[in-house]
Image (cartoon, rainbow, N blue to C red):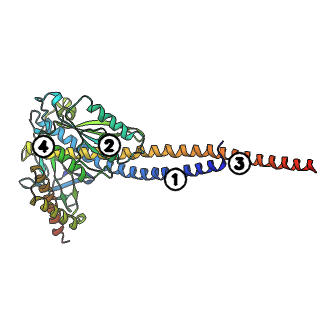
Amino acid sequence: MASAKEIQSRMRSIQDTMKITSAMYMISSSKLKKARKTLADTEPYFYSLQSAIGRVLRHMEDTEHKYFDERAEIAPEARKIGYIVVSADKGLAGAYNHNVFKIAEDCMENRENVQLFVLGEVGRQYFFKKDVDVDTNFRFTVQKPTMHRARVISEKMIAMYLEGELDEVHIIYTRMANAATMVAEKKQLLPLKKAAFNTSVQKLVDIHQEEIEMIPSAEEVLNSIVPNYLRGMIYGCLVESYASEHNSRMMAMDAATSSARDMLKDLSIKYNRVRQAAITQEITEVISGAKAQKKKL
Amino acid sequence: MNTFGLNVIASDKDFYHGRGKSISLPAKDGAITILAHHADMMVAIVPGEMRFQAEDNTWYTAIVGGGFAQIINNRVTVLADSIEKPEDIDLKRARDAKERAEEQLRQKQSLQEYYVSKASLARAMARMKAARDKGI
């Protein structure tokens, strides 16, 4: 059995770690609260945007537009695909990072022409070690997502798509399904899928469709809406991921704190036993020593 | 005077929600004013100043970044990535942004970088103009 002193120093180190984990829990929960608020603030914008694109498409179903061009002439195996991978800047968040990496690796399997755009330090390190084609100029943090960052990212993606450096752009991020579950997901950003917006078309077939004038032109309106939409989409994904990250960290830290508490409980029982044993032993020694002395007399 | 339903939504907040009498928006080829019962349409908005009159006749001014507006069934929805009141504008920040954009425009850039710098220059100019009009 370990000595009382050893147990004590072990307990002290657990207590110190517990202080850190419970502090991290508190930090994450306050950040999560903030992230939830930004998420709620962007939702009306995001949904209106989505319905607006749907409406434009409904009114010009046969429009050819560069953002909707599937580039079907390119063979599936020759397509250049870009993935934006949203990971965290640090670990200690349970399976949060690993779930995202797993999806990314599944996507990369048996494929060439895949390029990764990794957000977050953990992901960057992970894919760097694996010798994956990662854009090294793509350096953004995932802390406190801002519209500005989303704008820079979306502009880069749009430029690469239009110049033909990429034929498809996807984003891999983590969505908060509800307060307790986070789901890592892949979503296609470019080319935009008409089907994704067309869910309500069938219902509206019989209804009179109002004429909508596009100013200056339908093309111009789409040119303005689509980058906005992508920006909003990326921003939304960043905020979702940020909230999920802190939710996972909160849960991980909560688990760590409670298991530290369990360990402390076990150790303090053990410590008391060891101490009691030491005292008993000392008493026995004293008594037997005294007895030995008595016999001598 | 007739009114129309008006929603002004920025990416980070609901700017205005209610009824309006008139709204002027900065469009690609000049400002465009919409009154009640306007024909259905969609307009692409460029960075600039937007003004609207609410139901109680008060005028609001706001600086919009890029976005668009849709007018459907006498309901106007303005969606832009940023919408700010003139008093919220940080003149110093706008001036810095303008200088940065001009600096970048002077350098050799790719076409895409050129558009990005141009757009941020336009945003900064719109903000500065609004702040000047307010007399800050």
Q: Amino acid at mark 1?
A: Lys
Do the residues under discs 1 and 3 have CB atoms within 8 angstroms? no
| Viewer-nearest of discs 1 and 4 | 1
Real-space Cα distance between discs 3 and 4? Answer: 77 Å
Q: Residues within 10 Å of mark 3 (few under 14, many from 20)?
A: some
Real-space Cα distance between discs 1 and 2? Answer: 27 Å
Mark 4: which secondary structure?
Answer: helix
Q: In this figure, which residue is indicated by the disc labeled 3?
A: A275
Same chain shared by disc 2 and disc 3? yes
Q: Amino acid at mark 3?
A: Arg
Q: In this figure, which residue is indicated by the disc labeled 4?
A: A222
**Residue at (30, 38) in percent of width and height:** A130
Towards the viewer: A247 or A210 = A247
Residue lying at the far front in this picture: please name it: A296
Q: Chain of mark 1?
A: A
- The disc placed on residue A123 is 2
Q: Residues within 10 Å of mark 1 (few under 14, many from 20)?
A: some
**Residue at (19, 29) in percent of width and height:** A202
Mark 1: which secondary structure?
Answer: helix
Rendering coords of residue A294 (x, y %): 91, 49
